[in-house]
Structures are given as structure tokens and as C-alpha cells.
Amino acid sequence: MAETPIQRISTEAPKVAGRFGDGLRRFFDGDIWYSFTRSPVTMVAGVVTLIYFVLALFGSWIAPHNPFDMASLNLLDSLLPPIWQEGGDARYPLGTDDQGRDMLSAIIYGSRVSLFIGFASVILAMVLGVGLGLISGFVGGTTDAIIMRIAEVQLSFPAILIALLINGIMRGVLKENVGMDVKQGDLAYTVLILSIGVSGWVQYARTVRGSTMVERGKEYVQAAYVIGIHPITIMWRHILPNVTGPVLVIATIHLAVAIITEATLSFLGVGVPPTEPSLGTLISIGNDYLLSGEWWITIFPGITLAVLVLAVNLLGDWLRDALNPKLR
Amino acid sequence: MVAFVIRRLIQSLLVMFFVALVAFTMFRFVGDPVHQMVGIETSMEEREALRERLGLRDPLIVQFARFVGNAAIGDFGLSYQHKRPVAEMLLERLPATLELSLVSAVFALAVGLPMGVYTGLHRHGVLSKFFLTISLIGISLPTFLIGILLIYLFSVQLGVLPSFGRGSVVDLGGWRTNFLTVDGWKALIMPSITLGLFQLTLIMRLVRSEMLEVLRTDYIKFARARGLADRAINFGHALKNTMVPVITITGLQLGSIIAFAIITETVFQWPGMGQMFLLAVQNVDIPIMASYLILIAFFFVVINLIVDILYYVVDPRLRVDTATANGHG
């Protein structure tokens, strides 16, 4: 950048559209975009992730069939192999599952379910973790001690175990105390998002707490205090913007973990129901047919899942290095 | 030293207390325990009598104390589904899980360590790049998918390994072991690879980064200047100093392995505790869930305590920093 920010503000009209274009140009001028273009692996990962997002958003227009529409399924078309194998059908390029669902469409819809639950869980974990981390670091004292003890206890167990446990408890509470069965769509999503989200807040909270404690001691926060700004405003407007970098890195890597956790829970039979399958559910359905030779029901969703997680992991790794000033 | 051990002990007790509180809350408030234990035809009076007998009318604090007391002597109550003592069911399945976990840990260490040393020594070698790529893929493949792929390859396509179960086991006074039959060993191969792969990549990456770190230090340069053989430097001086964190992480991962066994045991229908826990989650069998939680917590706490003390004994320079036991399925 040739000009300093101050010059820019004084010379350019503060129009909203102009500022947005400015931000965009600054982004493409910046270090992050530069390091992105310098790493071919990361660019491939970025493109792959983008393709998944597009497929997830516009899947209903792209997919040749609607796998969730039970009325359109024909059992005569069940267990057809992919198109290049003997007995394949041109209407179903990747074959069909036990109910006659087109695998390609099921995978596109399933990626959408997996991504949706992944994102929702990450957002829940982030809101919970960042919120508790800010409070913990800012308020300190007993509040801090209690939150951090809970975090430590939770951290000493693998996230998948915590998620399973929360899942089991919620199913129990819903079934025994409220009388609802979790096997149905929306409720299953809610239970999944809550269990994955709550099992993942600790990383955010610990990082944010640490940064908050550092920021709290600095002059600008003290100054904000002195002129009588409300502590919540200080946390939100002054401290939070300073901790977004690490949070973004954690969130990216957590997205990969959340997608895997969702797939695992669905595979274990406590996740998304088979009527609206996610990638994990599809793999689980296919697992029952693997021994009799119908490999495509498992393998295609499996590859789809692995590629998605790999791409997100690579993006996360890159982002961590790109945002780390020590490595510049 | 004593003060340190006592502090860690108090911390461990705190964790156990917290876990017991969670387990108790589950047991007491998720559904009605009496409702779960009796059939439909039981009358209201009988239900009330049972409620009284179980002490569900006592103050909560008394109930909690009784719960902890019972758990301490290994009494976890009856399974809602199977109507059998949970402790008995857990004990029956404990050997299967422990043997699987042990073999996985040994596998992860025996393969991960040399791979880590190699990639550390030959940073830019083709084989190192290959190992690192494999490890990245290993991290991105969920455990259950690795298991399924192994089954497809070795059971369905090649037909050389069994796809489920423990094979034939030998009963050693209640401890049913896989280790004494060829069949049992064959049944162990795929599950332990599946379970150990994630730890393997973790150990490999850890050893690699530790080796890179150590090889840069002055005493290694000095050893080279003295003209020592590469072998003596790499293994006698460098590797030895990477061992402390490796032992720590491996120890801590042992607890994770036991927990991750839930997934592997389900894929391979391995009759261990994890499989039982998953069935309990599916059927909302609270006593099994609660007692599994307590048992796993106990394992974790004991392992953490031993590792912490070992760490302190081996390397007094480093004060204890909680190593994270995170990961994914």
C-alpha cells in the first residue's frame, strides 16, 4: 500500500459503496490474499470448498432428483450400480441406494445437511465460547474460576464423548420428560447442533479469555473505563475486535471437526435420520450393504466427506499460518 | 514434590466430583427412575413403595452422597434395559476394550515413532513428504470411514481378515483374552489399526517437530563438531530429548483411545464397553451411560495423574501445563 489509511479517509468520499470497494481492494492488496495466491494447495482447497458451498446452496437446482421426496422413489430402481458398471442406469450416474434414491442427488443434499449442521454447531460453539471467554477474562475472580474449571473438566474428555453424552441426555429428557421422539427431522437437527456446539466451546473460551486478559490491562481499555463506557460496550466494541483473528482460525478448524463429529454421530445411529440423510447417514446405510458388494452406497459419500474435511483442514492450516505474525 | 502431588490429587478429586454430579443429575432427572424399573402393570402403591425403598424421597444431598458411596464400591445399580447389575456388565466387557486399546497404543507408538524420527531427520525427502501427506489424509478421514474401508478391502475383496467380532477368545478366570489364539490376533488387526491411526499421526507429527527443534540446539552442533557418528547424535542425543513430551502425549492419548473405542467397537461389532455405551445412548439406558462416564473419568484422572507425576519427575525444568486431550472421531 502506497498511501496511509489517514490519507485515504481524507481524500475519498465516505460513500458506503466506495468504502466497500475500498475494503475489497485493501483485501486483495493485503497479506492474507497474497499468501493465499502464493500457496497452490490452499487455492485448490479454497476452490473445492467453494464448490461444496455452491452445491449446498443451489443443490435443489443442480441435483437431478429430489432424494427427500419419498413419493418419487421407485423400489425397482434400488441398488443399481454406477453408470460405468454392468447394470448401471443413465438416470443414476453414481447408482442408487436400497430405497432407489439417486446417490448423486443424495450426496448433494447430504453435503448440504452436513455443512448446515457443521456451520450451525460452529456458530453455537463460537457464540458460547467467545461470550464465556470474554466474561471470564474481563470479570475475573470467582466467575473466571468457575468457568475455567468447567472448561478444564470438559477438555479432559474427547469432544466426541461429550457430544455423545449430551446427545444421550437430550434424547432421554425429550423422550422421558417431554414425550417427544428425536427420530424426526428438525428435532434431530436441533439435538445434533446442541451436542456438537456445546462440546466445542472450550477452545474458543480459553483463547478469548487469554487475549481479553492481555487487552484488559492496556491503556485504551483503561481510558474507555475512565470516560464511563459501560463494561459490556467495552467488551463488545473494544476487546472483541482484537480477538477475531485467533477465533477465525479456531472456527475454521472446528468446522472440519464439527462435520466429522456430525458424520460420526449419524453413522452411530444417533444423528440425522435416514429419511433426510447427511453424508454420515448415507455411509451408515451403505455399511449394511458393503458386505454384499454394493460398495457405491458407502464409498461415494465417504470420498465426498473426506475431500470436504481435507479441504477445510487445509484452509484452516493456511489461515493459522497467514494470521500468525511470527511466521511472516 | 509432595505439595505438587497433593495439589494434583485435589484437582483430580474435583474432576471426579464434578463428573459424579453430572452422572447423578442424569440418573435422577432424566426420566423417572421408578418408571424405568417397573412394568406397566405395577400399581401406584407398589411404585410408591419402590420409590421409598430406593430412597428417592430423601433430600437430594443425601441421595447424592448415597450415589457417590455406592459408586465408590462399584455398585452402579441395574440397567433399565437388561435388568442386570451395570457393574457386572461393564466388567464383562472391560477386557475386550482394554486389549484393543493396548494393542492400538503399541501400534501407534511402534509405527509413529520411527516415522516421526525419519521425517524429522530427512525433512525434504520424498518419503517424508509422502508420510506427511498420508498423515494429513489420516486426520481428515473419520475413524469410522477408515474402519469401513479396511473391512471392504481386507474382508470383502481379499477375504483374509474377519469383518466383525473378537474371533475365538480364551477365558483366563473371567478375563477373556484375544492374545492366546491366532484367530484372536487376526480379529485384532483391523480394529487396532483403525483405532490407532489417529494417534499414530499425532505421535509422528509430534516426534517430527520435537526432532526438528532439538537438532537445531547448540549441544547437537557441538556433538557434530566433536565428530560423533550420526547414529550416536540422532539417537543417543536428539531422540532421547524428544521422549519427554512423547511419553506425556502417548500417556494422555491412552485415555482418548479408550473413549474413541466407542466408534471402532461399533464398526467392528467388538463386544467392548464402548459398544455397550453406544447402545445405552440409543436406548436411553441412563445407569449404563452414567456408570460408563464415571469409569472413563476415573481412567482419565488416574492416567493424567500418573503422567503428570512422571513428567515432573523426569523433567523438573518444565512446570506442568495441561496438555490438551482433544481430537475427533
Image (cartoon, rainbow, N blue to C red):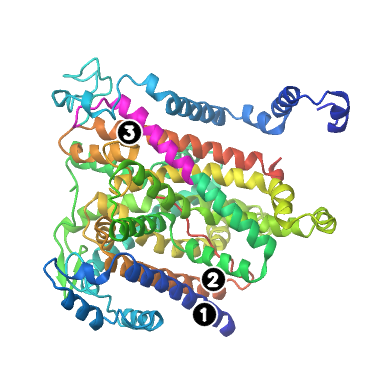
Q: CA distance from mark 1 to mark 3?
A: 47 Å
**Residue placed furthest toward the top:** A90
What stretch of residues is rendered in magenta?
A: A98-121
Mark 1 element type: helix
Give the residue type at disc 2: Tyr
Q: Residue at x 66, y 32 (%)?
A: A35
Give the residue type at disc 1: Ile
Mark 3 element type: helix
**Which residue is identified by label 3?**
A301
Instruction: Give percent across and percent down for residue A28.
Output: 69, 26
Give the residue type at disc 3: Pro
Instruction: Give percent across and percent down for residue A155.
Output: 49, 61
**Which residue is identified by label 1?**
B10
Using the rendered image of the protein, determine whether residue B131 is visible from the camera's viewpoint.
no
Q: Are marks 2 and 1 in contact (CB under 8 Å)?
A: no
Based on the displayed image, in which of its 4 quarters is residue A189 positioned? top left
On screen, residue B135 versus residue A291, left or right, reads right
Of residues A53 and B81, which is closer to you in this image? B81
Based on the displayed image, in which of its 4 quarters is residue A93 positioned? top left
**Which residue is identified by label 2?**
B311
